[in-house]
Image (cartoon, helix red, strand yellow):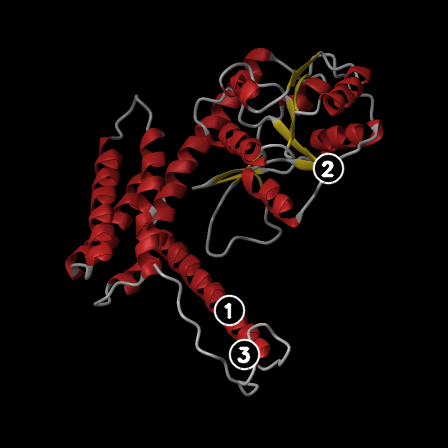
Amino acid sequence: MPDYDFSQVDAAIIDSQLNTARVFRDVLVRMSFRRMELFDSVKSASGLLSAGTPDVILVDADGEDTDAFRFIRALRNEPKVPNPFACLIVTTWAPTPALLTRVTNTGADDLLLKPVSPKQVQDRIASLIEGRKGFVVTADYTGPDRRKSPREGAQVPVLDAPNTLRLKATGQWNQAGVRMLLNEAIGFVTTQKRVRASVQVAFLAEFAMPGLSRPAPDRLAAEHVGRIGGFLDDLLRRLPDEGDHAHVEAVARAVKSLAESIHAQAERGAVEPGDVAQLQTMVRALMQATDPDRPLEAMTREVTAAVNGYRSRLEQMAQAKAAAAALAAATPDSPLHTPGTPPGTTAAVAAPAG
């Protein structure tokens, strides 16, 4: 490892296993970290979301793992966190595929497998100083860029997020300057969250429209339009107190009210055609209001491309599932094949209640 100076770097270790937490602490002590706080649960560490956020956080995901990932998501996405760009390393004894997916999708920087050696910890710290990924902001994610190829149809800028670990370890720390960098980056995230929320709302509406227009609305379409309100709630809470955002707020509230009405209609029966058409008009007005400098046509193309890609993936999944079912039915030893039923046919299966 290069000759970094960690004498100004603060860390937090969240681990219910005291012995493991002490191992991490001892490694950081030998690296000359200024301060290491130990927490035996995510709940006890909740103050990190409102007080001075440390530069590095190691959080164990083996206990109440939902709490660990809820903490990470909150740190990355809640508007009042002092430093939502802190370096986050998840630690675990059991790196299951499901856990790896959650690490990626909640905004953590890295995953460290236990037991660990001092060199492994040092190498991960060095990688966060030297090669940390840029951050992307979507409607429901803030964190290191997860994609190796461009997002379908989307124009998502990459943020060079302030890295207080790097700034301190390389002697570039300046309290006033870093606070300015953090404020600028947080402002960027807030603006992007509003823009991406409006695009996500338009995506949900466009995907749902064909299914909502049927005499008996499609259940998947109803579920998608039902998700609109949550994204609009997040958009509304990110509107600053200062400045003139009355138009954005008015349009967002109108879209939410209409989406809730359409969802209720879909649950009862047919949806008014005029309401479906009005929803499309209003979600486009919302995109225009949140991102007035970008042509509406470009945003609409982005949404349509994302919807088409999503439909294609759903179709591929359905075809793969049907092919698997057909193969299982044609295999005499398959649990889906009923004795006495000729290969290639299936016995009738009653749908579950509800």
Q: Which is in the foreground here, disc 1 or disc 2?
A: 2
Q: Residue at x 46, y 32 (%)?
A: 189
The image quarter containing residue 192 is top left
Q: Which is in the foreground here, disc 3 or disc 1?
A: 3
Identify the mark nearer the N-term, 2 or 3.
2
Residue 185 lies, in percent from the top left, at: 50, 28
The image quarter containing residue 257 is top left
Residue 328 lies, in percent from the top left, at: 58, 76
Identify the mark nearer the N-term, 1 or 2.
2
Q: Is residue 291 visible?
A: no
Front residue of 254/136: it is 254
The three-letter amino acid code for the residue at tag 3 is Thr
Identify the element where label 2 is drawn. loop
Q: Which mark is residue 316?
A: 1
Front residue of 16/35: it is 16
Q: Which mark is residue 93?
A: 2
Q: Is residue 220 above or below residue 190?
A: below
Using a 10 Å C-alpha cutoff, classify the residue at mark 2 as few (fewer than 14 neighbours), some (14 to 19) or many (20 or more): few
Identify the element where label 3 is drawn. loop
Q: Which mark is residue 338?
A: 3
Front residue of 160/203: it is 203
The three-letter amino acid code for the residue at tag 1 is Gln
Furthest residue toward bottom: 342
Q: Residue at x 53, y 29 (%)?
A: 71
Q: Residue at x 66, y 25 (%)?
A: 16
